[in-house]
Amino acid sequence: MTFSKADIIHLGSKALSHQNYKIAKVQVEYDIEVMASEIFASQNRKGRSLDTIKEHCKRGIVTETAAVMIFGGRRNTQKFDYTNPDTYIWDASLTEKNLLTEVKWIESDCEWVTYYNDNISTFNKHHKNLDLFLAAKMNDDPSALYYEVSFVLVANAKTFFDYWKPSSYNSKHYYNHFRATANGQCYPINLKE
């Protein structure tokens, strides 16, 4: 699908109107356990412990669930199979247009969308097959019965790496949301102005 600037603005406005979106912990606990167990049992665990995988799965499932609740659609709940990219290259199919979407967790104190290249390599390899990229912050207060999710970026997945640059400050890369916004390719929310 080709995105227009109006499409990006519409989706970004919807994300902006749902900041601090609440996801009940009991709603996602089972899915976190199942996904983490499947990945841990696979050849793709990359030396990670089960607890580390659960933490990564929690961030993904919670932010993906929030995206589905806000935009409509469904999560990719296929059983993880490293030999079948369709089971892992997209996280959610959103809106009535079935936009194949990558949803990435980002640290809550970031003013820029930044990742180590290793943490975004699967998306880099398959982004041309996807439509949308969402970056989200998640608050996980252990005493609360819910997680809070706020999206900070809605971007065109196909053009994402046109705006991906090495950071001058550390070994991460960053998404230049200033240039992407000027070209109608993203909608930043609460990022550096």
Image: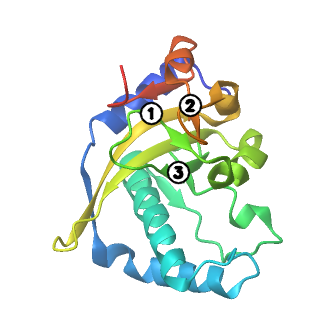
Q: Position of residue 157 (x, y in %)?
A: 64, 36
Could you classify mark 2 by the number of other residues whose Cα lies within 10 Å: few (under 14), some (14-19), or many (20 or more)? many
- N-term mark: 1 or 3: 3
- Disc number placed over residue 175 in the picture, else none: 2
* Closest to the observer, 68 or 152: 152
Residue drawn at x 72%, y 44% as measured from the top left = 124
Looking at the rendered structure, the kind of residue marked 2 is: Tyr
In the rendered image, which quarter contains the N terminus?
Answer: top right
Instruction: Left or right? Give the position of 95 relative to 151.
Output: right
- N-term mark: 3 or 2: 3
Circle 1 is placed at which residue position? 112
Circle 3 is placed at which residue position? 103
Q: Is residue 56 above or below residue 160?
A: below
Q: Position of residue 180 (x, y in %)?
A: 56, 20
Instruction: Left or right? Give the position of 119 relative to 143.
Output: right
Find the distance from the CA under tag 1 to the CA under tag 3. 16 Å
* Closest to the observer, 103 or 8: 103
Q: Is residue 188 above or below residue 50?
A: above
